[in-house]
Every structure is written in C-alpha cells, then in structure tokens.
Amino acid sequence: MVLLIHHPTVPQARKIRALMSEKRMLFALREEEPWNMSQEALKLNPAAELPIFVNDGKVLCGDYAICEYLEETSPEISLIFGDALHKAEIRRLCGWFDGKFYKEVHRNIVYEKVHKRFATGQAPDSRILKVGLNNLNFHLEYLDWILERRTYLAGEEFSLADIAAAAQFSVVDYLGDVPWEGYRNAKLWYAKVKSRPCFKDILKDNIRGILPAKHYANLDF
C-alpha cells in the first residue's frame, strides 16, 4: 500500500490525496509537521518538503513529479487528459495555483497564522496578512472570470487543475479567510469540488490547536 507523508496545512499534499482518491487508490497517511520534520522524514526528503510518497520502498518527492507518476502508472482514470493543448492548459493552471497562489496567498496567510505560531511562537504580522488577503481577492477575481466561461477550470470536465486550485483554497478556507460571498462563480465551483468523494476525508482534517471555520466542511455553505 502507498504511504503519503503529509500535513493538513500543505496544499500540495491535499492535492496528491485528492488525486489518489479520484483514481480509487488505497493509501495510508502519516502526518509530519512541516516546521519540525523528523529525522526519518528528512532522510526520505532532504529538501524538507511535503508530501513524501512511498510505494514499496520507493520514494518520490515533489508534488509535480508525484502527479505525473500517478498519471503514468494509473492511467485508467486520468486527470490530465485531452489533446496536447488541453493537457497544457491543465498543467498551466496547476502551475498557477501550485506556484503563484502558493507564494502570494498561502505563504502570507497560512505561514503567518499557523507555521509561524508553532515554529517560533510569534504572532502573525498584520502587514503580511494584509498582503496575502489582497492577493487572495486577485486570485478569486481570476477564478471567477474563468468560471464565467467554463464549467470547470480547464474546460467542461473535472481535472487536476480543479484539484490543485481547491487544495490551495481549502487550507485558507479552513482558517475562514476566503470571502466567497463576493465571488458567485468561484463559490459554486468550490461547492461542486467539495461535494466530490475525493474531498470527503480532506474536509475532516484538523490542524492541531486551530478549529476550522464553521462553514469549512459544509457542502452547502
């Protein structure tokens, strides 16, 4: 059975979990704190990053590499599909949320509110939080604009792009910082993603010492 070493605050780990669930794979989870990784985990990935994918003693690190590996080894249910142009669009959107959103939103909100608290005991910097929240609105505007034109992010079918985006938003939403009410298309899309079986266990996640927003696991929020 596959082992995924993860943490609820790491959206890339949520992305891999959802992808494996969509592919109907069996896997076990082991939690590691990203701000205090064990020596065992560091031996598996000296880059000190999560998730870490272990299958029959073989270790894969880096969510992009893991996604591509899963697509190649479990092709029966594909989340990167279509012609070359459509696959490129799925990968482009994954890159947007895994990279741009993560740097501009996650690091400014989740790191300040969670990682910093447990790693250093310091309070979040309100100036950095403000930057993250402003950036969040920019990304919501972009998401809303896309979803005026498409049913899902890359087109008419659910893909890895939707998983990547929802994984990022779900961590911030756990903290109650996503202003969904101002973005109707984005909210309807997120409700559809939350309703998929692949997000069932993710919505049960708990971050130690921090309660989720009241609407977090509500499918009709």
Image (tube, rainbow, N blue to C red):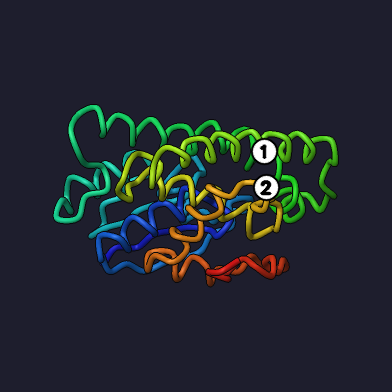
* Disc 1/disc 2 C-alpha distance (Å): 9 Å
- Could you say where residue 68 lies in the image, as x and y percent from the top left? 26, 41
- Could you say where residue 121 lies in the image, as x and y percent from the top left? 81, 53
122 up-or-down from 219: above or below: above
Q: In this view of the protein, which residue sits in the foreground, 133 or 209?
A: 133
Is residue 62 visible in the rendered image? The answer is no
- Could you say where residue 39 lies in the image, as x and y percent from the top left? 51, 53
In this figure, which residue is indicated by the disc labeled 2?
Answer: 182
The C terminus lies in which quarter of the figure?
A: bottom right
Task: Identify the amino acid type marked 2.
Answer: Gly
In this figure, which residue is indicated by the disc labeled 1?
Answer: 137
Q: Residues within 10 Å of mark 2 (few under 14, many from 20)?
A: few
Tell me the residue at 21%/41% (across/down).
81
Is residue 141 visible in the rendered image? The answer is yes
Q: Residues within 10 Å of mark 1 (few under 14, many from 20)?
A: some
Q: Evaluate if marks 1 and 2 touch, with contact meaning CB atoms under 8 Å apart.
A: yes
58 up-or-down from 96: above or below: below
138 up-or-down from 179: above or below: above
Secondary structure type for disc 2: helix
In the figure, residue 216 lies in which quadrant? Answer: bottom right
In the figure, residue 93 lies in which quadrant? Answer: top left
Q: Which label sits in the foreground, 1 or 2? A: 2
The N terminus lies in which quarter of the figure?
A: bottom left
Label total for image: 2
Task: Identify the amino acid type marked 1.
Answer: Asn
Tell me the residue at 58%/50% (across/down).
184
- Could you say where residue 78 lies in the image, as x and y percent from the top left? 21, 50
Q: 47 left or right of 85? A: right
